[in-house]
Amino acid sequence: MKIGGGPLQRRKGLFFVFEGADGAGTTTQCRLLAEALAARGHKIITTREPGGTSIGERIRNLVLDNRHREMSENTELLLYAAARAQHVAQMIRPALMAGDLVICDRFTASTVAYQVFARGVDGGITETLNQFVVGECVPDHTFYLNVSLAESCRRRVERNQPVDRMEEEGSVFHGKVISGFEKIATNDSRPKSILDASEDKEQLAARVLSDVRKRWAHL
Ligand code: TMP
């Protein structure tokens, strides 16, 4: 089976992405948007990064496993990129070609926030790598959920789940992720919404849906 390739000129679907630091609530907002659009009769594909394919989920387990504290920054960057390459080729691109609505929990901005702003890897290389793996599969609309460091920490503690390799980084690292996302969101010239993640989750979901319907009234 050949996966990926070919121009996306005939792309019929829409690609929505949620971005934000740990604890911003991207997963919840992906779910709430998917439920709202599905209730209106649309076919929705929800997915996440790293992950979304069986190869991507295996890479996710590897890259988030906190037994791998020795992982180099470049290895980490390439693993996220490899998961994304498979995700785009096997899932996102075919879904968009088929006319589906794809909602993705994190995408390229997460690599810039975590690997460039927080880890300090080269921004130019990351940009080239992102373009290489994504091609024309850029989001139609990105929702940036801004969260404060205090709120992000509070929510991560409240979740009371095992802490992964990224989450176990300290507050200096997560502070850099948060300020990185603020810069990325401000500088993103593509369609976007910048939202306050501290808002009640249902109110935030209503705002997201309203921004979607402002651009695509048929949704
Ligand atoms: P999450 O999906 O549970 O938020 O976990 C994914 C973690 O991986 C989160 O800490 C953000 C991080 N991440 C990166 O560092 N770079 C990336 O490119 C992506 C997609 C996620």
Image (spheres, helix red, strand yellow):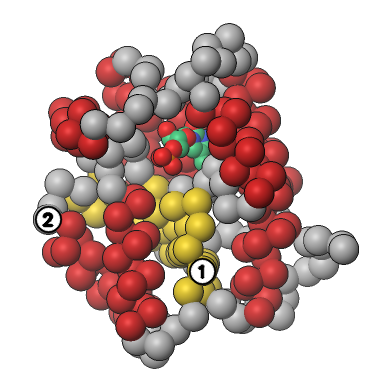
The picture quadrant where one finds residue 6 is: bottom right
The reply to whether residue 123 is visible in this rendering is: no
Residue occupying image coordinates x 33% and y 68%: 33
Using the image, tell me which numbered label, if any, was put on residue 45.
1
| Dot 1 alpha-carbon crowd within 10 angstroms: few under 14, some 14 to 19, many 20 or more | some
Please state the horizontal and vertical placement of residue 89, each as a whole percent of the image. Answer: 73, 57
On the rendered structure, is 217 left or right of 86?
A: left
Q: Is residue 16 left or right of residue 94?
A: left
In the orientation shown, which residue stands out farthest toward the right?
Answer: 1
Three-letter code for the amino acid on which mark 2 is drawn? Asp
199, 202: nearer the viewer: 202
Nearer-the-camera pick, 91 or 199:
91
Which residue shows up at 66% across the image and 79% down it?
98
Q: Amino acid at mark 1?
A: Ile
Label 2 sits on residue: 200
Residue sitting nearer the eye, 40 or 159: 159
Q: Is residue 7 above or below residue 173?
A: below
Any mark on residue 166, and which? none
Give the percent coordinates (x, y) of residue 163: 36, 25
Q: Dot 2: few (<14), some (14–19), or many (≥20) neighbours within 10 Å?
A: few
The x, y position of residue 131, in whole percent, is: 67, 47
Circle 2 — which element? loop
Residue drawn at (50%, 51%) of the image: 48
